[in-house]
Amino acid sequence: MREPDAAFADPRQAVLYDALDDDRSDLDVYLAIVEEVGGDRVIDIGCGTGTLAVLLAAMGRTVIGVDPADASLDVARAKPNADRVTWVHGDATSLVGRNGVGGPVVDGTLDHAGLLADVAVMTGNVAQVFVSDDDWSRTLAAVHACLRPGGCFVFETRRPEARAWESWDLAPTAITLPDGRCAVVERTVTEVALPLITFEGSTTIDGEALRSRSTLRFRERDEIERDLAVHGFTVVDVREAPDRPGKEHVFLARCDGVRPVPRPGA
Ligand SMILES: C[S@@+](CC[C@H](N)C(=O)[O-])C[C@H]1O[C@@H](n2cnc3c(N)ncnc32)[C@H](O)[C@@H]1O
């Protein structure tokens, strides 16, 4: 899979993630859904700096947070309740076959059901980092392998028709971080080649310009529903993100017990 972007993998940038995006009311819907579906064992895929994972752990859930950006995991590991979370450096495929979570996709198996997760979540539009069909397909297969039959996969993704990228350009803007330091942030969308959007960001802090480049994929709702079905999920609901009405889809997909037969090339 692709290396995570510098915004998450560069230790100098990872420590700024929470400060630059300090309103996490977007996570409320996930906390509510985990309550709603009654999930005790939760996997947070692309957990980043771990804000949701530690909240879930504080609620008494058994939580695994997985992310390929070790620098972000280091931030997560320093948070209150972080010691109640199992942190895994990797992606969803890293969980398959791991002791206590998941089972090999080809082996897959109801006899591990007692150890499989009840809920898998991907917050912060992690679903859009999977640019290639292969990465997306491998991720869906791995999530399926990690969930118990009937378990719930919850994730959000931006709706292409809302054209979010049209408001992403940001002229150099000074902001004060919670620790009192001043940072100047700047962002430019450099390529619109739907379904891919590429943008570059820069944060100048303590005289140093920290740069990142990201490409995200915008998938249509019917495309996602089809991909979920191919990978053994049944979409049970598609909701609004309450804090971003009209802009996002929040998918709730049930993991069907029968493991799908991999398609050639899938
Ligand atoms: C916008 S952040 C969201 C982080 C966190 N879920 C949140 O809500 O704050 C996107 C995250 O996706 C992670 N990521 C990148 N590639 C990934 C992959 N192949 N599998 C899982 N996560 C990935 C990044 O390292 C980053 O932490």
Image (cartoon, rainbow, N blue to C red):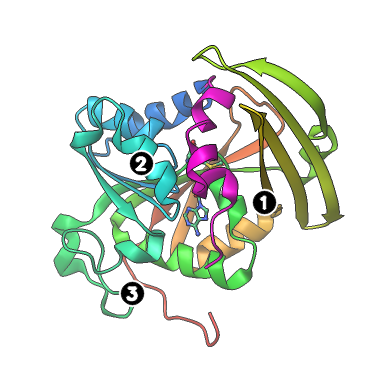
Label 2–label 1 contact, CB within 8 A? no
Residue with the most extreme bottom position? 264
Q: For mark 2, what is the residue?
A: 74
Q: Is residue 163 above or below residue 58?
A: below
Q: For mark 3, what is the residue?
A: 105
Label 1–label 3 contact, CB within 8 A? no
Horizontal side of 89 relative to 131 (left or right) equals left
Q: Nearer the viewer, residue 225 or 196?
A: 196
Sequence order check, earlier mark of 2 and 1? 2
Q: Nearer the viewer, residue 215 or 230?
A: 215
Q: CA distance from mark 1 to mark 3?
A: 25 Å
The amino acid on which the numbered mark 2 sits, given as a three-letter code, is: Asp
- Between disc 2 and disc 1, the foreground one is 2
Q: Residue at x 42, y 80 (%)?
A: 261
Q: CA distance from mark 3 to mark 2?
A: 29 Å
The x, y position of residue 33, in whole percent, is 40, 32
Q: Secondary structure at mark 1?
A: helix
Q: Is residue 131 above or below residue 87?
A: below
20 within the magenta span: yes
The amino acid on which the numbered mark 1 sits, given as a three-letter code, is: Arg
The amino acid on which the numbered mark 3 sits, given as a three-letter code, is: Val
Q: For mark 1, what is the residue?
A: 221
Horizontal side of 233 relative to 108 (left or right) equals right
Q: Secondary structure at mark 2?
A: helix
Q: Residues within 10 Å of mark 1 (few under 14, many from 20)?
A: some
Q: Residues within 10 Å of mark 2 (few under 14, many from 20)?
A: some
Horizontal side of 45 relative to 229 (left or right) equals left
Q: Quadrant location of residue 247?
A: top right
Residue 47 in view: no
Q: Which residues are magenta?
A: 1-23
Q: Secondary structure at mark 3?
A: helix
Sequence order check, earlier mark of 1 and 3? 3
